[in-house]
Image: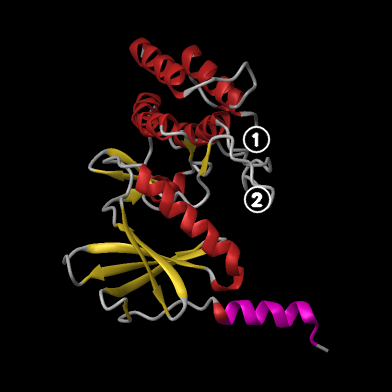
Amino acid sequence: MLGLGYIKQVYQAWIDYPWKEGLLLADRYEIIEFLGEGSYGLTYLCQDTVRGDKVVVKQAKPSKGKRSRHLLEREMAILERLRHPNIPGCRGSFWHNKHLCMAVDWVEGHTVEDLLFEQNRGFSERESLECIVRLMSIVRFVHAQGYVHLDIRIPNVMIRNGEPVLIDFGLARRIGDVDGSDTDMNEQSGIRRTPEVKSDLYAVGHFLLFMLYSSYEERPGQLEKDWQEELSLTSHTRKIVRRLLQIEPPYEDASSLIRDLKQALRTL
């Protein structure tokens, strides 16, 4: 017999089924393609028939109910306060068939994840540090406005004309804003995403490791080792990663990290 759990899964898959290409939303946004889904939202690439350019439309995930709408409303409110050339701007919200949606600027470029794993792009130590310096300039701005991103990962950073763009603020929070209903966990490390600056800096440590490993060549038959044994790094870079991963006393803010990154670059 089919159990209740199976029935719930089928129902959720049905109500979360993405809208079709060509559908016109709010008499303005025509769906070009479905981009994917996260824990609380579905995203589409659309044509803005009024302005004539492309946008990303994010739909609150139906199966998550009020929780997904709450998170989307919070994301919109945060983006309205984060006006930065390297953060996609929010164009507003609308309802389509009782589903809350948000339109944000489309970013032309590739995610760091695509560059690493689809295009096999390798980054040298210098290139990795230079990218992180530019990324941290955006992160420092976010922190200065009183927020943390809480999802700085290689799929959420795009490279546009050589410059990083920080996207997807679906988990962003005001610093210190503890919401008892949040149980978000970092998928890579298994630790809770606490609304603190150190959470973003810890995530940047993993982000940097991904970039540094892009130029690493594994030899056949080689046993897997710790990153500190596998990667040939300068002492400055090694110390930066150790502090980001909280192996050594962690950074307190983005500015101190940027200072050390620039010092490391001067030694290369």
Which mark is drawn over residue 108?
A: none
Quick one: label 1 or label 2, which is nearer the N terminus? 2
Question: In the rendered view, would you say 210 is above or below 15?
Answer: above
The residue positioned 79% from the left and 86% from the top of the image is: 2
In the image, the segment drawn in magenta is 2-14
Could you classify mark 1 by the number of other residues whose Cα lies within 10 Å: few (under 14), some (14-19), or many (20 or more)?
A: few
Q: Is residue 113 visible?
A: no
Residue position for label 2: 182
Q: Nearer the viewer, residue 65 or 13?
A: 65
The residue positioned 41% from the left and 67% from the top of the image is: 101
Q: Circle 1 — which element?
A: loop
Question: In the rendered view, would you say 227 is above or below 39?
Answer: above
Residue position for label 1: 224
Residue 209: percent from left, percent from top = 51, 32
The residue positioned 37% from the left and 43% from the top of the image is: 81
Q: Residue 9 magenta-drawn?
A: yes
Q: Nearer the viewer, residue 19 or 179?
A: 179
Q: Circle 2 — which element?
A: loop
For the C terminus, give its image quadrant.
top left
Q: Quadrant of residue 92?
A: bottom left
C-alpha span from label 1 to label 2: 35 Å
Q: Is residue 11 left or right of residue 147?
A: right
Q: Say what amino acid the circle numbered 2 marks.
A: Asp
Q: Is residue 88 left or right of residue 255?
A: left
